[in-house]
Amino acid sequence: MRRRADTKEIRGQVRFSDPVCGCSFTLPEGRYRIDLQHFSIQLPADKIRHTIRIYTAGQEELARIDLYDNPAALSPEAWARRHLAYLLRDRVELSRQQIGPGGLPALFIRTPRSPQAYAVNTAVIASGKRIAVITASRPDDRDRRFLLRKLLNSFSF
């Protein structure tokens, strides 16, 4: 099932909230398109439940948020080792932080640029039995870095 969500402008910023996805966040002032995709709840717990894609008005993807169930209430590190092991290679940089207004635990994975691909930042965020994986490419771009920082500082389940 795929549907497009409309966003609204609040004091120069875009505030997104969706009761089906169960999360909310704020983006810097600008024009965005946000697409939502919902998947069957009958799929195994390690499969994506919801995907939120954030695009520029010019159709360029800025960030992707994948929401998962976390029935074992694993930490971001344990969940990433179990489900995102392919990201945890030798050359990645790992850091742990708390994000959002609730201080949610997060694991940050920075994959460096290669000759074939842009650098990618991935944040794995845990809240009880929910996991969010936020991915943004080209973190060396100042505007994209600002957008990701705003999204992470305001993200909540």
Image: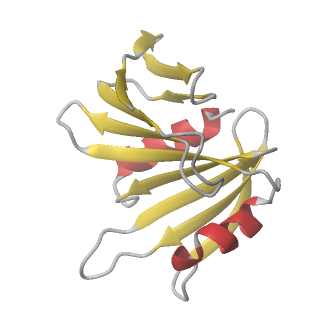
Q: Is residue 13 left or right of residue 30?
A: right
Instruction: Name the residue furthest left.
Output: 58
Tally of marks? 0
120 relative to 51, above or below:
below
The residue closer to the viewer here, 50 or 90, is 50
Residue 25, quarter of picture: top right
127 relative to 119, above or below:
above
* Quadrant housing the N terminus: top left
Instruction: Name the residue furthest front.
Output: 42
**Residue shown at 32% from the left, 80% from the top:** 114
Q: Is residue 38 left or right of residue 41?
A: left
38 relative to 82, above or below:
above
Residue 42 place in picture, x, y as percent: 59, 44
Residue 35 place in picture, x, y as percent: 35, 32
**Residue shown at 47% from the left, 73% from the top:** 111
* Quadrant housing the C terminus: top right
Residue 12 place in picture, x, y as percent: 42, 15
**Residue shown at 37% from the left, 16% from the top:** 6
Residue 102 place in picture, x, y as percent: 78, 35
The residue closer to the viewer here, 1 or 61, is 1
136 relative to 40, above or below:
below
Q: Is residue 103 left or right of residue 83?
A: right
**Residue shown at 42% from the left, 53% from the top:** 136
Q: How is the image coloured?
A: secondary structure
